Amino acid sequence: MGATAFLQIVLVALSGSVALLADTLHNLGHLATTIPLIIAFRLGMRAPTRRYSYGFRRAEDLVGLLIGAVIALSAGLIVWESVRALTAERDMTHRGWVLAAALIGAAGNEVVARYRIRAGRRIGSAALIAEGQHARTDALTSLAVVIGVLGAWLGLRWIDPMIGLVIAVMVVLVLISSMRTVIHRLMDGVEPGVLDAVESAAAGADGVRAVRDVRARWIGHRLETELVAVVDPALEVARSAQIVDAVEDRLRQALPHLDRIVVRITGASASADADGAGQGRP
């Protein structure tokens, strides 16, 4: 991506293409956010401390906000340059090279997008998925540059800056979609069906009569949950511990991104939680 962006910068300077400039700004945005994302993943691997007892995986979600800011900045610059080009009537040069750069950029960005989205979904990272969607938009914007080149060949100079404005709209739509997920996770929201899956898996464990007070949240790309399992109040402590282990095993099978589990045991007729707490291992 760095090589592609460098090539595009040279061609933007030579050709004056606003559509290619928009594509270049988007690629530079990727370079600006990739390093913080790597740092966030590294930081998330650090062990919890007395001050940050839940660890540092939330840094990944904060980087998601940075990615959104960079996307918004690139959209603003694209609109600015597109409007300037519409009023100045720039003429595009080196059109063959611009066309080649657009096609290469589209192919390269789509490869990057598929890799990042697939990896993000595999590990449950909203920030990485946002970066993948960002790259997919770049692939579409690169294809849009082709339309600008064809318009320049036909003598329609206004098409190139108009394509720049269309690209800006596409960037904003991706920004809204990506930030919705990131902010949702920062607010400890989970996807529809997650709590249902937790309740169903826990209720299926042998000895569990009911499940209540279920909670779940994402921290970075890992999910954690806590619940109360209602059991027979006459059970011995050893049997309660076995039930906790069974609940944890079923939850890990049902939710592959699950990291931390807290299960409390209470008797079916008890008014307060009885002894018995289990916590999953990371």
Image (tube, rainbow, N blue to C red):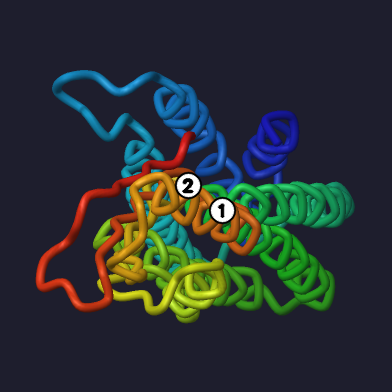
Q: CA distance from mark 1 to mark 2?
A: 7 Å
Task: Work out whether residue 208 or residue 78 is closer to the camera in this orientation and state it.
Answer: 208
**Label 2 belongs to which residue?**
222
Residue at horizontal 48 percent and vertical 75 percent from the top: 203
Task: Work out whether residue 95 or residue 117 is closer to the camera in this orientation and state it.
Answer: 117
What x and y, as percent, mark residue 239? Answer: 44, 52
Q: Is residue 94 visible?
A: no
Question: Which label sits on residue 124?
Answer: 1
Task: Work out whether residue 31 or residue 14 is closer to the camera in this orientation and state it.
Answer: 31
Res 238 quadrant in image: top left
Question: Which label sits on residue 72?
Answer: none
Total number of numbered discs in the rendering: 2
Q: Is residue 258 above or below residue 87?
A: above
In this rendering, the label closer to the viewer, 1 or 2: 2
Residue at horizontal 83 percent and vertical 72 percent from the top: 150
Residue at horizontal 27 percent and vertical 76 percent from the top: 268
The mark nearer the N terminus, 1 or 2, is 1
Query: What kind of element bears circle 1?
Result: loop
* Residue type, numbered disc 1: Gly
Residue at horizontal 36 percent and vertical 60 percent from the top: 235
Task: Work out whether residue 181 or residue 227 is closer to the camera in this orientation and state it.
Answer: 227
Label 1: how many Cα within 10 Å (few below 14, some 14–19, many 20+): many
* Residue type, numbered disc 2: Arg
* Mark 1–mark 2 CB contact (< 8 Å): yes
Q: Is residue 197 visible?
A: yes
What x and y, as percent, mark residue 281? Answer: 47, 35
Q: Is residue 200 above or below residue 52?
A: below
Q: Is residue 247 above or below residue 233?
A: above
